[in-house]
Image (cartoon, coloured by chain):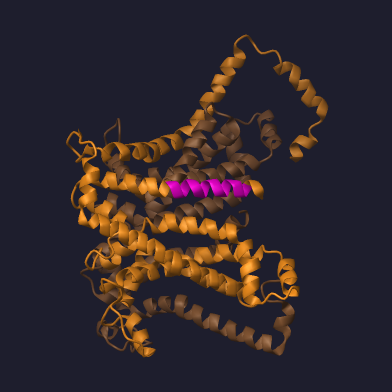
Chain colours: A brown, B orange
Amino acid sequence: MSTRTLVSPTALARPRGRAVYWTVFGAVVVLFALAFLFPVYWMVSGAMKSPDEVAQTPPTLVPEQWHLSGYKDAWELMELPRHLWNTVVQAAGAWVFQLVFCTAAAYALSKLKPAFGKVILGGILATLMVPAQALVVPKYLTVADLPLIHTSLLNDPLAIWLPAVANAFNLYLLKRFFDQLPRDVLEAAEIDGAGKLRTLWSIVLPMSRPVLGVVSIFALVAVWQDFLWPLMVFSDTGKQPISVALVQLSQNIQLTVLIAAMVIASIPMVALFLVFQRHIIAGISAGSTKG
Amino acid sequence: MTKTAARPPAEAIAVRPVQAPPPAGGRKRRRLADQARAYGFLLGGLICFALFSWYPAIRAVVIAFQKYTPGSSPEWVGTANFTRVWHDPEFTAAWRNTLTFTALALLIGFAIPFLLALVLNELRHAKAFFRVVVYLPVMIPPVVSALLWKWFYDPGAGLANEALRFLHLPTSNWSNGADTALVSLVIVATWANMGGTVLIYLAALQSIPGELYEAAELDGAGLLQRIRHVTIPQTRFVILMLMLLQIIATMQVFTEPFVITGGGPENSTVTVLYLIYKYAFLYNDFGGACALSVMLLVLLGAFSALYLRLTRSGEEDA
């Protein structure tokens, strides 16, 4: 299935066209390998060099001797299991909280017709206009001393979980999807005696798998990749996620060990991407074609 | 769907009379119960938005006019925070750096992904491979890409200078030189983020009807003319959207300067967000931090509003 693009198929079929095509193709392959794959290789192999070798000029392309001790030291010295676990807890919690509260709210706004529903939706959409990072300081103050109950969520995973729910983009995505669900299916469930919660659980959610998948990936990636917010809220070193811990520990650690830790920190998200790449790439591409 | 269709219509009619006469005041009570239920579903989300979006937005503006340190009672100071922040020599540097960063990011981080998408769209082989590879850096945590490039930029054993030496080019100070640091950071940000942009451009390029190119070619348009008169006008909307998004995103840059350069050398990479962070967590001056936040908020809010308006009108057109 080839549609006509910038260059016509007839031009490509000519010997000269074919020569140009394969030259460009080769150049792009080399460029991509150098620009995107090589840094990853450099990181993975750099961690296996000896401390002397990693600092030498000119650098070696292949480690003279493959050491696994860099990875082992990173795992132990930098307490990676603990920081990885912290990140997993933070990301998983944010994911669950977002799925529960955002779907419930989106369902209410889409199907239950609450009074002032339009005003509330407007208020939620208005937050899309506020650049997230610019609000990070007052948000920090709120988390440090919650209004009315005056407790602090600092150094508590709730400081990641609860603000993650206030995600207008994901909520709107869910609401728009729920809007498209046919009314009569939900009404049929109601006539059969299903309550609102039951309808949401057994009718709406199963039909919403694609959008729930997208929201899940967004939620997980966002927490895993975030840096400034966890840097602010987790001053307790033992509770920091891997991104913050890496930066905090990067000063006083051997380069090979740091690089190994960087590789380890990248593995979960890269693995997630490689497993779900079709869906992720389709999701990103779909976002634009509408425009 | 099948359930409703299978239900005999007679039964549906038969049910109705039973429900029809509502007891006096019942409808109102019923509606109240419905409302309570709807708000029950909304509650969690509503509380979170109130606490972590609406309240901080209002609070930023309030604190901007207060002398505020956590623990002591706030004191109204009028516009003192704004004037103090304004006269901070780092203020000028931070805004200049942020705006330069954004401009460079538009120049480098915008032309390159577009050209890349343009070329990729012409390739007939290994499309899936290119798509995965270009997006790979996006999935590497930003902190890791920042640390990775910090190592590449290292004046001694760094790969960046090694590459220059290999090409017999003069070496550079990269992130360690006051005049090259900012560009070095833009390169990192472009490398790390362009995967998404390339994919969106690719999708946009694929939606261009092929007849337009055919017609242009029949009219004798060369390659560059086809790009200029077909490709760019056809993707103009996406270009504009991504440009706005890029401005909004790059003006909030923090991780790269914080991790790679620490704002230096000579304040050449202090950004507005970095300065906000400094005011709050180094100087413990939350009034100043909020005054800066409000300035950033006003400027970026305008871009975001424009973006939302355009996407909405774009959706209506489609």
In percent of the image, x 24 and y 52: which residue is there? A235
In percent of the image, x 59 and y 74: which residue is there? B120
Q: Quadrant of residue B64?
A: top left
In percent of the image, x 75 and y 21: which residue is there? B15
**Vertical placement of residue A225 versus A58, above or below:** above
Q: Is residue B116 left or right of residue A129?
A: right
Task: Judge whether residue B305 is colored magenta.
Answer: yes
In the rendering, at what x and y percent does residue A171 appear?
51, 43
In the rendering, at what x and y percent does residue B269 appear?
28, 64
Q: Is residue B31 left or right of residue B54?
A: right
**Vertical placement of residue A46 versus A84, above or below:** below
Q: Is residue A147 left or right of residue A95?
A: left
Residue toward you, A62 or A130: A130
* Majority secondary structure in the magenta region: helix
In percent of the image, x 30 and y 63: which residue is there? B257
Q: Quadrant of residue A107?
A: top right
In the rendering, at what x and y percent does residue B45 appear?
45, 37
Q: Quadrant of residue A206?
A: top right
Residue A118 in sight in this render: yes
Residues in magenta? B302-315
**Vertical placement of residue A226 versus A178, above or below:** below
